[in-house]
Image (cartoon, rainbow, N blue to C red):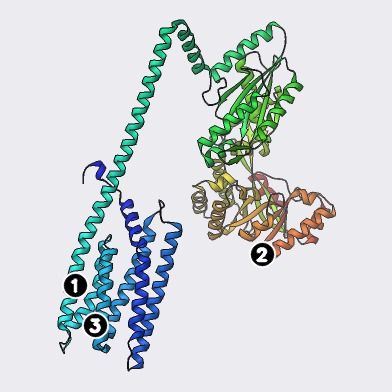
Amino acid sequence: MNRKEDIISKVEIERDTTDMLLGNSFVGLLMTIFAFSGLVFFFENDEPSIFTHKLQVWIAMMSISIARLLDSLYWRANLAGKMYNPRPALIRFSVGLYITGTIWALYSILFYSSMATVELAATMVVLSAMAGGAGTVLSPNKKLVSFYSTALLVPMSLCAVTDEEGKFFILGVLGLVFWFGIFTSAFRYNKFFINTLHLKARNNSLVEQMKTERSETEKINQLLIASNEKLDASNATLEAEVERRTADLYKLSNRDPLTNLLNRNGFLKHLNNLLDTTRALDNSLALLFIDLDGFKQVNDSLGHKIGDIVLAEIANRLRDYTEENHLGRWGGDEFVAVIPYANVDTAKAVAHAMRSGVTVPIIANDNQVTLDATIGIAMFPEHGETAVDLIQQADLTMYDQKREQRGSIGVFSQALHQEIKREQQLCERLRCAIDNSEFTVFYQPIMDVASNTLSSVEALLRWKCDDESISPAVFIPLAERSGLMPEIGAWVLNRALIDLSHWQFKQGLAMSINVSVSQLLDDSFLKTVDNALKTTQISSARLHLEITESVFASDKEVVSVKVNELVARGIKVSIDDFGTGYSSLSRLQSMPCDFIKIDRSFVQNSSEESDTIIRATLLMAKEFGCKTIAEGIETEEQKLHLAQLGTDYLQGFYFAKPMNAGDLISWYNENY
């Protein structure tokens, strides 16, 4: 069939076939159960062993029949009438049928010789009846109907034909003839079934085509009616029509069709007019940039139709807090509003009111949606003289607020402007930091409490940009946000392992390296680790990777897989800043780790509460077979106290500050 309307997908054929097979299977299975049970229990047998074997075959038939009945009921309850993947259901049905047919065939072969004349005749009648029914019911699938009818009739018929006594020769021949008739009829039924499916598909296509053409015709009719009405109106009053069209054009170019608010172009025009008036009156105004929090999840989970309903409702609510044409949709889920004659306090009050209006739950097509808003404020003339400047400053403020705390309100300041400008400059320089050799890796010793010797060193990245040392607390978050962390992390890993391979320190000295969430989630991370170990010939057991508890908030499953793959390579895993993240105990239960690093905040706080937390951490680490490392040791008292509590390793300025590779070698030679 070459015509488009004659084509029906293989999946559709499989689904219809499966529906037919499973839909008709219930009665057939009941008949199988009753017929098989009748043959086993109705006829008496003088030999107990024969009955025992029959009983065993009966148990097998009942087991598979009940399983198939349950599968049929599952199909009726969960799949029937739905667009489901038919392959698993068809496979289950086929396997069950093959087993059932095999049992029938075995029954005929195994017990033929022990059957009396009446029992043999009854068995042939039952098998013929079952095969005849199957020829129709199973006809949607050639393979199944061929196998099943053959399994039921051919073994018994061949036994009768080849019987040395020849008493049932005619009965066997009739069975084979009956089998051949069923076989050929089933193939005709199958062809009829497939043709019916294609006919159904063509009919559905014709119905859809008819609906489409009817819809198009209706649209054309409506357009013709509308055109005639417009033409009549034009003839009645041409001047009014020109004015109306002018208004429509203005609306199209200046209004957002979804919310009926001013669009970006219309709002900028209106804001420029307001600025001219405000400037002439030597007054002030406020520009609010409003971004919805959580709207993307609405679109992703509930769809754009619900999203449009939500946006329209938010627009209606925001209108309550502004004058006519003082609110616009900037794009997506962003809105802008202008408040004339406002000072900072007035602007904040309006912003808080707007946010309160946004947070009220919205019911959209039986879905409850709750959003929040982050709002940035810029004032005229303090923060900008033009419409573009004010919107840009308010947008920057909103972005900074969203980064710090969603659902908050902020006012633009020069300090913020300078901070954002500096961040942008640092981001640009960060992209070239590796090529410009601006990075250095410093190392801080980690001491073994038991032997008071060096156990490992932690690699700490330092950045010197134009003779200015940039704090890791500043550039690490920038690298994360700009997507540079995987590349920078790979550089640190290679640099640290190269240095370790050159040091003539104690045998087995380990290197501890911090790994960020973006590195763990990067597809090339494990390959980077493998290449670094292979290139430097460093044993995987000497590599300790530190991850913070916060990484598990991103993608627990992916992170768990990556961590388990690291452990499988023999790499040691440390949980850094333990106790400051979330779900600490559950992490220990589900994630393999070798070390737990006690955060410096607990070490440097000498209160009983901090000691309680440290003791609890030590106890948990012991239960889970982990070693503990205490950070932030700065005094002899802290060293002795943490050692007394039972910490395995210590790290801090008391032993040594982070040093470059050369200074670390000197420190080691002086102390060891």
- The residue lying toward the viewer, choosing from 50 and 208, is 208
Q: Amino acid at mark 1?
A: Phe
SS of the residue under disc 3: helix
Residue located at (63% from left, 45% from top): 661
Residue 282 placement: quadrant: top right
- In the rendered view, tell whether residue 222 sits above or below residue 165: above
Q: Position of residue 589 (x, y in %)?
A: 64, 61
Q: Amino acid at mark 2?
A: Gly
- The residue lying toward the viewer, choosing from 520 and 247, is 247
Q: How many marks?
A: 3
Residue 141 can be seen in this image: yes
Q: Which residue is mark 1?
A: 178
- The residue lying toward the viewer, choosing from 482 and 397, is 397
Q: Amino acid at mark 3?
A: Ala
Say the numbered circle drawn on residue 625: 2
Instruction: State which mark lies toward you, 2 or 1.
Output: 1
The reply to whether callout 3 and callout 2 are in contact (CB within 8 Å) is no
Residue located at (30% from left, 77% from top): 104
- In the rendered view, tell whether residue 355 sits above or below residue 83: above
Say the numbered circle drawn on residue 121: 3
- In the rendered view, tell whether residue 221 sits above or below residue 518: above
Looking at the image, residue 600 sits to the left or right of residue 561; the answer is right
Q: Pick whichever of labels 3 and 2 is earlier in the sequence.
A: 3
Q: Residues within 10 Å of mark 1 (few under 14, many from 20)?
A: some
